[in-house]
Amino acid sequence: MTPSSQIKRHPNGLQHHNINDEQGFSALIVVNTPALDDSGVSHAVEHLIFRRSAAFNHPESLFQLTALSDLAINASTHYNVTYYHCHSQCQKTCLLGLNYLLNGLLAPIFEAQDLAQEIYHDDCYGVINRELTPQQDDQQGVIARSDTSAQRCYQYGGDIELLSQLTFTDITRYHAQYYQAKKMHLVTGNIEPTLVASLLESIDDTTQNRTPYCPKVLPKADFCNNRQLVRWYIHSEFYAYFSTNHKNLNHLIKSFDAQLISPQYNLNNNQQFALDIIAPINVSETVLSKVLISFILKHPEGKSVEEDKQLHKFSPEIIRLFNYYQTLVRDLETNLTKSIAKNLTKKPPQSLTEHATFIVGRGTAYPLQKQLQQKQAQIKQQQTKTPTALLPVANLLLRPLSEHLSENEYPQSEYKHRALPTLFSSLLLRAQQLLIQQQDQGQHPELHQNRIAEVFDTDHSLIVINIKEKEQGLALLTSFIINAYPTFLASRTQGHCYAIASQYVMESHHLVFYSAFDVAPYFRLTVIIESLKILCKDLPFIAAALPLAKSKLNNIELKNVTADSVAEFISHNLLTSNT
């Protein structure tokens, strides 16, 4: 059942639907962002929108908003659309998040240094570069490059070779072309249009439809002599079927010394995904098609079970808005489209054999490109060098956050603990084993409470610190402040890693620091400790952030915690073994 809603088109053209939601306050902004090439320009614009705007002119703003409030805010780029969303239990907090998003969408500031730090520079730096580099080692990038047809699915996340060529002009042209208020949809939960209107009035939206973005072309590359890519384009409604049956299908394909690649939910302009097989050059498309058709005939169940692969990144609150938007889009279909769809359903029924052939269709064989081994070798060589020094930053707290707290009582829901990302599971196990070894080395049991384990691998780093039971609340409070500190965040904001954070793990009573997809994981441990040394002496910042951290946690026992006690906690627990 579709919830009741208020509908308004704001003066700048933004279409707004507000629905009555059961829980909290939320907002979803939908922007059509087609992938026009393999540069990942839509992905790059998404990152830069979060980085800087006229009203939020510091790259740390996003991290301070989420560290010092209960605001959940994020975005995700897909093959033809980008979703921006936020959620909070407090209306004023959600409005602050929505204001941040609207300013970034409609009045962003693009700077050359931001493009370098957020996208790409010097082979291995840049946030998106760090995100994509591990993917360039797998077959998917090679496969995507091998298909040179007009119907190919572009790598909307970006191919590093083209990503590195994105210019200031590319970014501004793409943004001006697609990020116009009249082309966006805003769906909110419990946020009336009058509140949004007041936010829009303060935004100087100067976006104009200037010269359109010019797509880039992948350079030609060498091909493998004895392998080929055989590709079928199949309608998205059958994605779930081939994804679910991938293992069994691949078992059959292996008999031809071939490999069925796990399907990717990346659709072309015809709403088709690519089903890929890497096979010897002497295995024909016809033979492989017969294998696929034969499998469908033997396993016809659930061929058209379709699942929305976009929803897994969303919280329940945002999923409700997304579902409303999907219903809205269906309701806005033209009568012509409905008529065409109705006529299509009146076709004579096909036999099972005909239907299976229709699903698979005719595949196309392409020479398989070689992996860019030389480029990857250069990147890995660069990573073995001492990393570029971080630039100094101003350790300031976002002014709207401080004003937000002083303007009103700041009711928050109970803090929701989140698990450590599974990406760090193996490193966490290694760190825990180190802590146990330290305990078993004949040291006094009371010293075990303050032990620190530092571990890393080729891409990630992790610091795990035991916390005394009586200081667990203080550790959690301190982690919020650390996550808002610009010097601590500099490794992320300057493109040395994809993510960096401090997190208290309640189950094991550990305070954890981590960096993900880091250009120098072995060195990041030292950088983190150095940033904590600076923070523990920065009492003005701690004092400014502390009331926000307390409000987020809403723990009566921590009301009397002072800036001095936070600084002492950092110095005594986090730095003792490293000074």
Image (cartoon, rainbow, N blue to C red):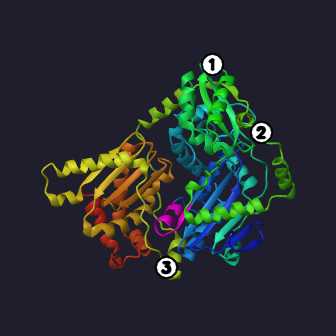
**Of residues 348 and 6, the one drawn nearer to the viewer in this rendering:** 348
Residue 432 visible in the displayed image:
yes
Name which residue type carries label 1: Ile
67 relative to 109 in the view: left or right: left
Name which residue type carries label 2: Gln
**Of residues 211 and 517, the one drawn nearer to the viewer in this rendering:** 517
The secondary element bearing badge 2 is classed as loop
The residue labelled by disc 3 is: 410
**Of residues 193 and 333, the one drawn nearer to the viewer in this rendering:** 333
Question: In the image, which disc is placed on residue 281?
Answer: 1
Looking at the rendering, which quadrant does residue 159 occupy?
Answer: top right
CA distance separating discs 1 and 3: 66 Å
Numbered circles on residues, count: 3
Q: Horizontal and vertical percent for residue 107? A: 68, 62
The secondary element bearing badge 1 is classed as loop
* Magenta region: 60-73
Q: Horizontal and vertical percent for residue 102? A: 65, 65
Sequence-first disc among 1 and 2: 1
CA distance separating discs 1 and 2: 33 Å
